[in-house]
Image: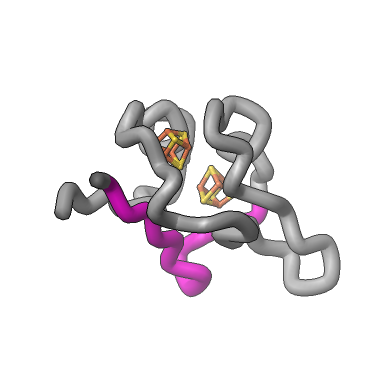
Amino acid sequence: MYIVSIDEALCSGCDSCADGCPARILSFDSDKGVTYVSGDETECMGCEACVAVCPSEAITITEM
Ligand code: SF4
Ligand code: SF4
């Protein structure tokens, strides 16, 4: 099982990660200007597509 977390302090709000997530658990918060884990973080598949596109190294995937 994988857990995804996003460090909002590092996220620049580029919104690159959400569209490519096959689990559809990432969403952009236009009010805060950051992307957050809007779904069940335990549904992360560990593909690291989000990590690959993030320019800010804001996303961490942890295998449990
Ligand atoms: S690792 Fe893959 S499934 Fe998990 S949040 Fe990132 S893009 Fe989505
Ligand atoms: S790719 Fe990185 S910087 Fe861009 S919205 Fe996602 S977490 Fe934030």
Relative to 54, does residue 22 appear above or below in the rendering?
A: above
Q: Which residues are magenta?
A: 2-13
Q: Position of residue 56 (x, y in %)?
A: 43, 49
Is 50 on the left-hand or right-hand side of 63? right
The location of residue 49, given as percent across then percent down, is: 42, 27
Above or below, comparing residue 58 to residue 1 in the picture:
below
Is 35 located above or below residue 21 in the figure? below
- Residue 6: name its quadrant: bottom left
Q: Is residue 15 left or right of residue 59?
A: right
Residue in view at x 21 percent, y 52 percent: 62
Quadrant into which the N terminus falls: top left
Residue 15 falls inside the magenta stretch: no
Membership of 9 in magenta stretch: yes
The quarter of the rendered structure image containing the C terminus is bottom left
Question: Which residue does the image show at 73% across and 64% down from the upper left?
Answer: 33
Please name whichever residue, 43 or 17, is drawn nearer the observer in this view of the structure: 43
- Residue 37 shown left or right of residue 42 in the figure: right
